[in-house]
Amino acid sequence: MKISSAEFICSNTDISKCPAPDKPEFAFIGRSNVGKSSLINVLTDNSKLAKTSSKPGKTQLINHFLINNEWYLVDLPGYGYAKTSKSNRRKWHSFINDYLLHRPNLQGVFVLIDSRIPPQPIDLEFMQWLGKKRIPFVMVFTKIDKLSSNELNKNLKKYKQRLAQEWNAFPKYFLSSTVSKLGKDEILDFIDQVNQSYFESIKNQ
């Protein structure tokens, strides 16, 4: 897939105010400061589309972007550490869950994982929750340019061993680097395949 247009549509915390669910959409989420906004900007070839910051917790709303006038890319607030109040974190948790559980056109969630660190309980718990709620997701290991291939393989092995304790199969995953743009084509091709299936199913209804 080649992205020819990426347009910001709206930001909000109320699912009822999201765009009409008449196009397939994909949500991106991960722990604070995992590189989510940077990845979105690389995927769309627009360095200013999603706001990036060295400080965790920059994204605080559900942000919809219309891609190629065909599908939505959704930037969700990061979970985990952020310099904000507990009440704000509870509010984020509530509207994120509401979105993930009740958005009918959501085709999948991209869960971003920092490739430099071993499996974190908060990531594992979130993926377990997605699995229990039957929300389709894939994993994206970010920042792989910041460690050696040997270190990367060790961390991937740890994830596979950890998830094998509770999952029958390791979820589909992508390796990414916003420096080299590794993973960009693979992620976009995956979205394109899902979109084709979506439009085909709509056509056959």
Image: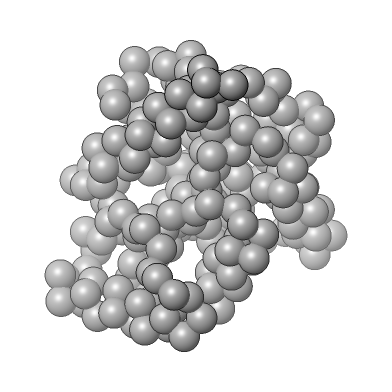
Do we see residue 15 in this rendering?
Answer: yes
Q: Position of residue 17 (x, y in %)?
A: 78, 27
Q: Position of residue 175 (x, y in %)?
A: 28, 56
Which quarter shows the N terminus?
top left
**Residue 55 as seen in the image, left or right of residue 140:** right
Residue 139 in the image: above or below residue 8: below
Residue 192 quadrant: top left
Residue 31 quadrant: bottom right
Residue at position x 34%, y 22% from top?
3
Residue at position x 34%, y 58% from top?
173
Residue at position x 48%, y 75% from top?
167
Do we see residue 142 in this rendering?
Answer: no
User: How many tags in the picture?
Assistant: 0
**Residue 159 as seen in the image, left or right of residue 103:** left
Which residue is at the far right? 87
**Residue 202 as seen in the image, left or right of residue 44:** right
Say which of 116 and 162 sits in front: 162
Residue 189 in the image: above or below residue 127: above
Residue 139 in the image: above or below residue 161: above
Q: Position of residue 95 (x, y in %)?
A: 77, 47
Say which of 129 and 53 sits in front: 129
Which residue is at the far front? 204
Which quarter shows the C terminus?
top right
Q: Position of residue 25 (x, y in %)?
A: 54, 33
Question: How are the colours assigned in the image?
Answer: one colour
Residue at position x 36%, y 58% from top?
172
